[in-house]
Image (spheres, rainbow, N blue to C red):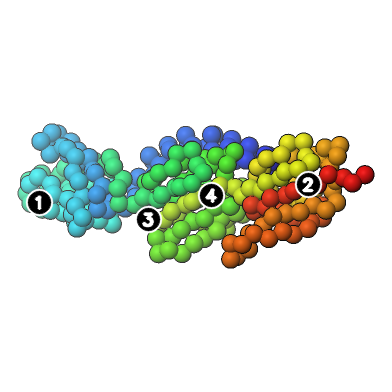
Amino acid sequence: MSSGSKKFFAILSLLFAFTLPSLIEAQQTTGDDYRVGPGDLLHITVFGYPDLTGDVRVSQTGNMTFPLIGAIPVAGLSPREVETSVSDKLASGHFIKQSQVTVLVMEYQSQRVAVMGEVAKPGQYPLVGTRHVLNLLADAGGVLIATAGDQAVLIRANGARVPIDLVAMMNGDASQNPVVHPDDTINVPKAAQFYIYGEVQRPGVYRLEREMTVDAAISAGGGLTRRGSERGIVAKRHGTNGKEYKVRLRGSDLVQPDDVLMIKESWF
């Protein structure tokens, strides 16, 4: 891994570590932005009336059933709006003239986003309020420094794919940190790799950095051995038809994903 990439992922890791607690706190304090939907579990408290306090699951039709007043449509409402609706119906039904109702969302089931791939905690995460890609990556514990690529993809619920440049995002490019919506998926794929064998100090598999040249790849492999030569470097590649072919490279040429670089022995 190049020094630039190491610095980037170190900063990214620190950002996730320091922002995750605050993001969770913000999630808990911005509940009024959340819109209730099917499957959500609500805890409803009516002050002074313990018999009316309990958990209620929102049905697939977007309704919840509450004692005394029956079915109430709540899909699309904020928790505060649900409080007002319950209070108004208790009053209009002449059950409780002025009730104090509190609604807490215990399980966010209707509006969730999947975070997959090279993150610490892949899974489904609730979409509470306005959230961006970086918020959801933080919820998932951040990217895995050793294996994550610097490109991610946001897959919309309709199948549209939005490429995310993680480096540009961390450099403040707001266009690379879009708002996420219910049923979106964020995928952080593994970093591309290349292979280097022959006359290098440390043959093996390495992470492919951006704009990585053959010279940089040789450096990643520890440099040439005493017998190694930068002349006649050959890369094995696979074409679009899957067939393998060979190409000769110079030190300034760019390495491609899954290249197998063969460093030959010097003739002199």
Q: Earlier in the sequence, mark 3 or mark 2?
A: 3
Amino acid of disc 4: Pro
Q: Position of residue 176 (x, y in %)?
A: 57, 55
Q: Name which residue lies at 82% across and 37% down.
A: 225
Task: Name the residue carrying label 4.
Answer: 189
Residue type at mark 1? Gly
Q: CA distance from mark 1 to mark 2?
A: 76 Å
Image check: 112 left or right of 14?
left
Distance of label 4 from label 1 (alpha carbons): 48 Å
User: Mark 3 = which residue?
Assistant: 183
Check disc 4: other Cα within 10 Å, few if <14, some if 14-19, many if 20+.
Answer: some
| Cα gap from disc 3 to disc 4, whole angstroms | 19 Å
Which residue matches tag 2? 263
Q: Is residue 223 above or below residue 187?
A: above
Residue 204 marker = none
Q: Can residue 142 be seen from the camera position used here?
A: yes
Q: Which mark is residue 70?
A: 1
Q: Specify the amino acid type for callout 3.
A: Asp
Q: Nearer the viewer, residue 29 or 110?
A: 110
Spot occupied by residue 255 in the image (x, y as percentages of width and height): 72, 54
Mark 3 and mark 4 lie on one chain; the one further toward the N terminus is 3
